[in-house]
Amino acid sequence: MFSAKLLVQALLATAVLAIPNSKERLATRTARRQGKPANLISAAKVTTNEFAVQEELSSNWAGAILIADTATYVSVTGTFTVPNVLTDNDNVMECAAAWVGIDGSTGCEGAILQTGIDFCVASDEKTQSFDAWYEFFPADVNFFDGFPLSVGDSITATATVFTPTSGSLTLINNSKDVTMSVNVTSSTASLCQTNAEWIIEDYTSDPELPNWGTVTFTDAFATTLSGAQVTPGDGDATLIDIELFSPDFEEDEVMTQSSVDGNTVAVKYAPALGGF
Ligand SMILES: *[C@@H]1O[C@H](CO)[C@@H](O)[C@H](O)[C@H]1NC(C)=O
Ligand SMILES: *[C@@H]1O[C@H](CO)[C@@H](O)[C@H](O)[C@H]1NC(C)=O
């Protein structure tokens, strides 16, 4: 299976956006989690449910990306609901993240200014856990300690660029009017301001993804250097979906279905072959 995964990554490398694997971030975040479980794979039940493949596929990102040729984006924001995250698997903890960010995709893989939440579910479908975080990749993730997160909460995430090496990251829990904001600087990253994105990320190194239903970013827009607001729809954002190798089917499986409508980005958990 290990070699199969490598093969898939090699195959994907020709077809997907060059998005940093974020192994450093993964190691850091997963290291903070209790007992990341073994990679147990449950038998998938459905072999159909094909749907149109989106413009881009990634091993770790799904959602929408505004892409500009030159420095354009100053901030990105979106509001989403903390998902009631489920799993069919036993003896695993499955995690994904919802976030907004600047850069990290086409032509600017070396820096990402981003903030959002991790959502995880343990095997019994009862134990859910959430973390609020911010990150100026390639620096390690930091957590907004004490930020309240519960299923159904409305969360607004915003990343704002001050200079290519500095910015602010803000999370708001609209339900309880809790705001946490931080200013960050980087000595290693330099933002290009050519991407603004709304993303669900498979940030673990395991192939399992939790079932988050659909996470919908609303009131989504980016601001530009000229002071304009651009929505994902107006900006003709590029859709991206996660494709992973299914050990059960011994082939790649598209795991998500992303869509854009005006100022809304929806990312549905929609495994083409039945999930893991
Ligand atoms: C936001 O914080 C509250 C309180 O902490 C928490 O109960 C809720 O689940 C979170 N969302 C909202 C509403 O706060
Ligand atoms: C971040 O920097 C801005 C601009 O200098 C400032 O207005 C704001 O108060 C700072 N925020 C924090 C949390 O330090």
Image (cartoon, rainbow, N blue to C red):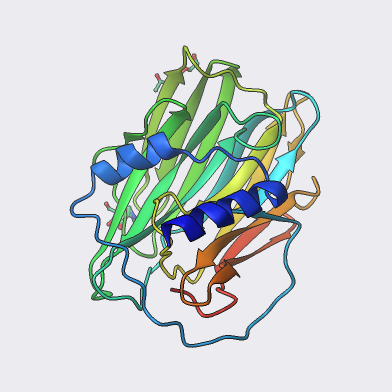
Q: Quarter of the image for the C terminus: give it.
A: bottom left
Q: Residue 60 in the image: x percent, y percent?
A: 53, 51
Q: In which quarter of the image is ligand 1?
A: bottom left
Farthest front residue in view: 3
Give the total of numbered labels. Answer: 0
> Of 25 and 5, which appears nearest the observer?
5
Seen at 31% across and 37% down, the residue is: 28
Seen at 74% across and 50% down, the residue is: 238
Identify the image quadrant of residue 120: bottom left
Judge left or right: residue 74 versus residue 120: right
Vertical order, 21 against 226 (above or below): below
Res. 215 visible in picture: no
Seen at 46% across and 76% down, the residue is: 248
Identify the image quadrant of residue 71: top right
> Of 5 and 235, which appears nearest the observer?
5
Farthest top residue in view: 187
Identify the image quadrant of residue 63: bottom right
Q: Residue 246 in the image: x percent, y percent?
A: 50, 70
Res. 260 visible in picture: yes
> Of 208 and 144, which appears nearest the observer?
208
Vertical order, 44 against 142 (above or below): below
Farthest left residue in view: 34
Judge left or right: residue 169 versus residue 164: left
Q: Residue 224 in the image: x percent, y percent?
A: 73, 29
Seen at 70% across and 36% down, the residue is: 106
Q: Quarter of the image for the N terminus: give it.
A: bottom left
Q: Residue 61 in the image: x percent, y percent?
A: 57, 51
Judge left or right: residue 274 versus residue 26: right
